[in-house]
Amino acid sequence: MPPLVGVIGKTNVGKTTFFTAATLVDAQISNHPFTTIEPNVGIAYVRKECVCKRLSVKDNPVNSTCIEGYRFIPVKLIDVAGLIPGAHTGRGLGNKFLDDLRKADALIHVVDAAGSTDAEGRPVKPGTYDPIEDVKFVEYEINTWIYQILKRDWERFARYVDTQAPDTIQALAERLSGLSVKRTHVVKALKEAKLEGSKLTSWSDEDLKKFASEIRRASKPIIIAANKADLPEAVDNIKRMIKEFRDNIIVPTSSEAELALKRASRKGLIKYLPGDKTFSIIDESRLTDAQKRALRYINERVFKVWGDTGVQKVINETFFNALNMIVVYPVEDQSKLTDHKGNVLPDALLVERGTTARELAYMIHSDLGESFLYAINVWTKQRVGEDYELKDNDIIKIVAVKARH
């Protein structure tokens, strides 16, 4: 299953605007708490320079799109209910919020970097609330939620695992499988919490909390979209956030600017590609005075200060950095770079770094995985075996025999 990324955050921070800008799904945007009650699911795109540029070929993608030499690969985002302090106790829509996150593989935390919303999500004068508190409380709420799940009947579970379970790591992974926790996440969390090899019955409550925190880091990494970055009050706050949270990915973001640019581009008023560091006006005579002012503002307060709107960067950072994914291009004809229908470089697949050639074959079709013989690396024209670890931008042909019946 491809990764699912949750868009989270306090109410009124621009979370739904970010989601809409990323997906252009017309989610309800309103300035009051709990606008988003049912989760909105939409398709966003990671942006990656396509190999067609390097090969000087004209591609015709099937599973993605290629615009001006950039491949846009679809990914799934879920926008969930706004969060307030105390969510793990059921405050606000806390239970709903946390339940929506169970299947998320990473989290984009949209923060009001301008400090224009208080702890409860109520609008306040920009600069009067510290966004650092939002980052802390969201991590606390999610970590505490996982801790509470682990804590339920922990003593009985720990005794059983220590005395009867053949594999402690597998037992922990199965206990947390409903949260999309994998065995690899458990291994990493045990190591980071310095609990490797210890008996579960020896864990203190602090050990359990530390393990819960590390499980969240491993299985649901958080990327911070420092939103409302166009407001002057955001500049110093973002610098402080970067200093305070050195281990976090923090991206200055203006969701409203991205949404405005995408809508203007859709109407044919400007030329703009998501992730670009500039835009150009196609026909100034078609713009109203208000639209001209808005575009000047975006240029001055967003592009000249931060380089881009940050929305595309957040998506890319989530998949390529936090989720450690790469892009590979499977083909059936290695000389023509086509599938059986003649489409050139038809598919760009996001796969986890470390994925093997045989695992790729299974992703394409189970029969291909089962009857795998070898693969061909199109760049080197060499055969590679089933354990070959795919590299970013690999073009791969899978060679298989028909499965025997």
Image (cartoon, rainbow, N blue to C red):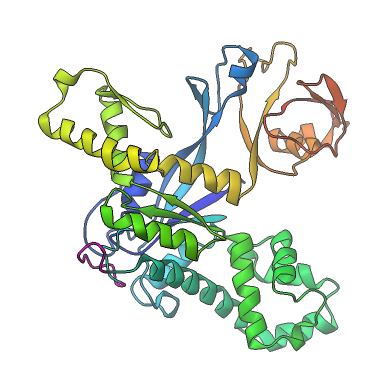
Question: Quarter of the image holding residue 301?
Answer: top left
Residue 284 x/y as whole percent: 18, 20
Query: Is 317 placed above or below 195 here?
Result: above
**Which of 140/32 is in front?**
140
Residue 379 x/y as whole percent: 76, 21
On whether residue 230 falls in the magenta region, the answer is no
Question: Quarter of the image holding residue 338?
Answer: top right
What stretch of residues is rendered in magenta? 119-128
> Would you say residue 25 is visible in this rendering?
no
Residue 252 x/y as whole percent: 40, 49
**Which of 136/376 is in front?**
136
Q: Residue at x 53, y 50 (%)?
A: 4
Q: Main secondary structure of the magenta part?
A: loop
Question: Quarter of the image holding residue 93?
Answer: bottom left
Locate residue 373 relative to residue 95 in the image: left or right: right
Q: Residue at x 39, y 38 (%)?
A: 308
Q: How many marks?
A: 0
> Would you say residue 390 is visible in this rendering?
yes
On whether residue 127 falls in the magenta region, the answer is yes
Residue 317 x/y as whole percent: 53, 46
Q: Residue at x 70, y 38 (%)?
A: 363
User: Which corner quadrant holds the C terminus?
Assistant: top right
Locate residue 262 relative to residue 63 in the image: left or right: left
Q: Residue at x 55, y 23 (%)?
A: 62
Query: Is 359 placed above or below 336 here?
Result: below
Query: Is 266 placed above or below 83 here?
Result: above
Locate residue 156 relative to residue 251 in the image: left or right: right
